[in-house]
Amino acid sequence: MRIAVFGAGGFVGGWICEELAQQSDIEQVAFVRQWASAVRVARRGIPLRQIDLEDVDALPAVLAGVDAVVNAAMLPPSREPELVTTLYSACANAGVRRFVQLSSAAVYGDLTGHVDELSTPAPATDYARAKVAMEESLRRTAGRSHPQLFILRPSIIYGPFSTAWTTRYAARIVDGRWRGLGRLGEGTCNLIHARDVARAAIAATTADVAPGVHVLNINGPEAVTWNSYIERLGDALGVTDRVTPNAALFRGRAVAAEIMRRAATIAWVRQAYRRSAGAARAAIQNVQATTNLYPSLVELKLLGRIVHYTADQASRILAFHPSMPLETGLQQSATWCRVHGVA
């Protein structure tokens, strides 16, 4: 079986390629948009090719002889629906039998309680709205063509190479001496290790399943609070003298950090930074480092949201069960962070 992975230079794409490399009965080819992102996969000896998904004319040649495609490419939200549907159509023309698309549980927005695949998406951010638009476009196209379509909606993906939910939180725990966030962190942290996401994607390419489009939540084996995640990651990192900040003060600082982040996107502010030097540049960098300690307002809502993304469908359809215990995943993540100078 020949599997093509798009987005191989990214966080999840890299994990998928590494997992595929351990399976002797699968031939894979990995695609990156820029050679600069290929180092992680290249060191494994995995065949690599460079392609930009906007280069539609190049797709037929690279898809020749491919049985299944996994698309984990990070794309501009404004272009994602168009580019992913174009890739799917090219796969249909090339005779690819199965197409696996990585989406996100972010499509459910601010929904709470138990959320399954029948729950109506309620995207609350541009990122989530792009995912919903992409899913809808794919499902319309898949309704009148081949290959068989799988859309996977992972929850919070953590593990080595994760910027959003591992290295960023490790840095916050170290620099901010976080033990937890008190009442601000009582929401559900739906963690799934990147290796399990990779295993789910591979299962979607190989499982013997009924015809049709399958949209599946992918979640980890344990549901913990964000406070628990922060405390246990801090323990794994060996950070001492941690404290739980005052909730009202922390929220106020998060609002101030958000204002500073938005100010940094203003053109004249960016120009002033580029022109600054010496003490002025150092002062600006210190402000940036301070703002990184605090979550965005969207993230702050997530930290307090009580929700569980049920993944029974993935178990039933793919016979997929997450195998990475949270404690093991946290220890692995902490070790990786220390080796790479994050903590």
Image (spheres, rainbow, N blue to C red):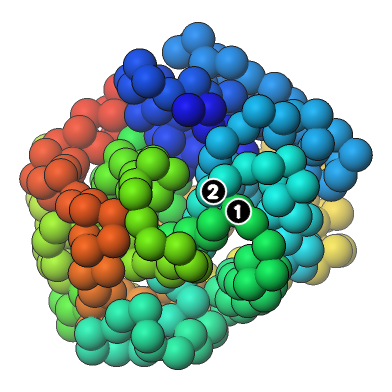
Q: Residue at x 37, y 85 (%)?
A: 118
Q: Residue at x 54, y 48 (%)?
A: 98
Quarter of the image that includes the C terminus: top left
The percent coordinates of residue 23 (x first, y second) are: 34, 22
Q: Is residue 154 above or below residue 338?
A: below
Which residue of the protein is positioned furthest toward the right in this rendering?
57
Q: Residue at x 16, y 43 (%)?
A: 324
The percent coordinates of residue 186 (x first, y second) are: 18, 78
Q: Residue at x 23, y 88 (%)?
A: 113
The residue nearer to you, when weighing 196 against 189, is 196
Q: Is residue 125 above or below residue 146?
A: below
Give amino acid for label 2: Arg
- Name the secondary structure under disc 2: strand
Q: Is residue 269 above or below residue 126?
A: above
The residue nearer to you, when weighing 331 against 113, is 113
The percent coordinates of residue 269 (x first, y second) are: 79, 62
Q: Which residue is mark 1?
A: 147
At label 1, counting other C-alpha atoms closer than 10 Å, the crowd grade (few under 14, some 14-19, many 20 or more) is many
The percent coordinates of residue 93 (x first, y second) are: 77, 47
Q: Do the residues bearing badges 2 and 1 touch, measured as CB atoms within 8 Å?
A: yes
Query: In which quadrant of the rendered view does residue 203 lie?
Result: top left
Q: In this rendering, would 33 be left or right of 283?
A: right
From this viewpoint, is residue 184 visible?
no
- Name the secondary structure under disc 1: loop
Q: Which residue is mark 2?
A: 98
Q: In this rendering, would 194 be left or right of 107?
A: left
